[in-house]
Image (spheres, rainbow, N blue to C red):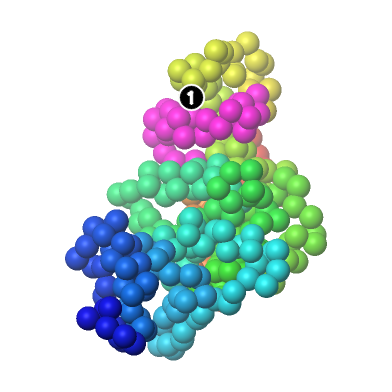
Amino acid sequence: MATAPGAVILADDFGDQLDTANAEHLAARLRASAGQLWLSTRRPEVARAFEPEELVRLTRRGGVRAWHRLERPADRRAIRAMRQLHTQLLPALTSPTVAITEGPHDLVVYGTVDRQRLPGAAPLSAVGVRLVAAGTGQDGGIGEIPVVADLARSLGFRVIALIDRDKAEEQTIKQLEASCHVVVRLPPKTAIEGALLAGADIAAIRAASATLTAFLNQDPAEGVPDTKVVDAVKHSLHKKSLHEPFLDALVEETQTPPPMIVDVLDHVATAASTSYSGPAIIDIPAVAPPGVAVPS
């Protein structure tokens, strides 16, 4: 029937009973052969069969229903943003809120700790939040968050930005405020590696660092004075992209997820609510090593 001239096809919950590949394949075949095609779906694979401007996302927040449709990119910024649609936003299709990190390193740290908190605390998915990155490689960074955030908002997502505070400029912060509902930022001069290590004692950091010899020729903390261990490990994590194995080893040593990362996730969960009435910029407080006071 799809090949009949001018055929109009309507289907509800399309792809629910199909595997990933067949859902996308059948949607693409129907799109190519039907005169007009209307599909409702919860499957990002089905949406991948269509051009971005052909997608309509339906939302309901606080009892208010709305629809959202993308426009064809009209400038280079929009083209750059659209590249994130399939890799970042379509997988979040059914989540009301996206929390956008600066890049893959931040994403893997927040995502890993979010899983490690179980069963003691609920993951972000319990409050409808999907963690995504502003880029999948060298194309990320704080400056890319507004680009992805604008695209997400045009699709009806509530948008929260998770940013470092190592080199953010005031102009970038203003752009983030304009593009995001809420911005959660780490303490001054703190990147994701510093947040990962915050609150851990030197012995635990050394023990976790020693496990990195499975990936490196030398332990980053070996032969380094205690006063410089944190900086040495932060540098190695950033340069060698070994956040995952180090985080696993650190949690095994401390038996608790990194407290600053947990604090960020807790604030994200709170800010995801449509009834949230707190500040638009949430500053995460510093966490001192055991026995060291944080300056007020």
Q: Measured along the vertical axis of the image, is residue 2 above or below residue 193? A: below
| Residue 77 in picture, x, y percent from top left | 69, 64
| Residue 172 in picture, x, y percent from top left | 75, 60
The one nearer the camera, 153 or 49, is: 49
> What segment is highlighted magenta in the picture?
232-260
| Residue 5 in picture, x, y percent from top left | 31, 85
Q: Which residue is mark 1?
A: 208
Q: Amino acid at mark 1?
A: Ala
Q: Quadrant of residue 284?
A: bottom right
Query: Is-magenta flag for residue 282?
Result: no
Could you say whether the residue bearing mark 1 is in a helix, strand or loop? helix
Which residue is depicted at the point 27% across and 83% down? Answer: 4
**Neighbourhood count class around disc 1 (C-alpha, 10 Å): few under 14, some 14–19, many 20 upward:** many
Query: Is-magenta flag for residue 234?
Result: yes
The one nearer the camera, 80 or 117, is: 80
* Left or right: 291 as drawn, with respect to 39: right
| Residue 249 in picture, x, y percent from top left | 43, 28
Which residue is depicted at the point 68% across and 22% down? Answer: 228
Residue 86 appears in the rendering: yes
The one nearer the camera, 46 or 277, is: 46
Q: Quadrant of the N terminus?
A: bottom left
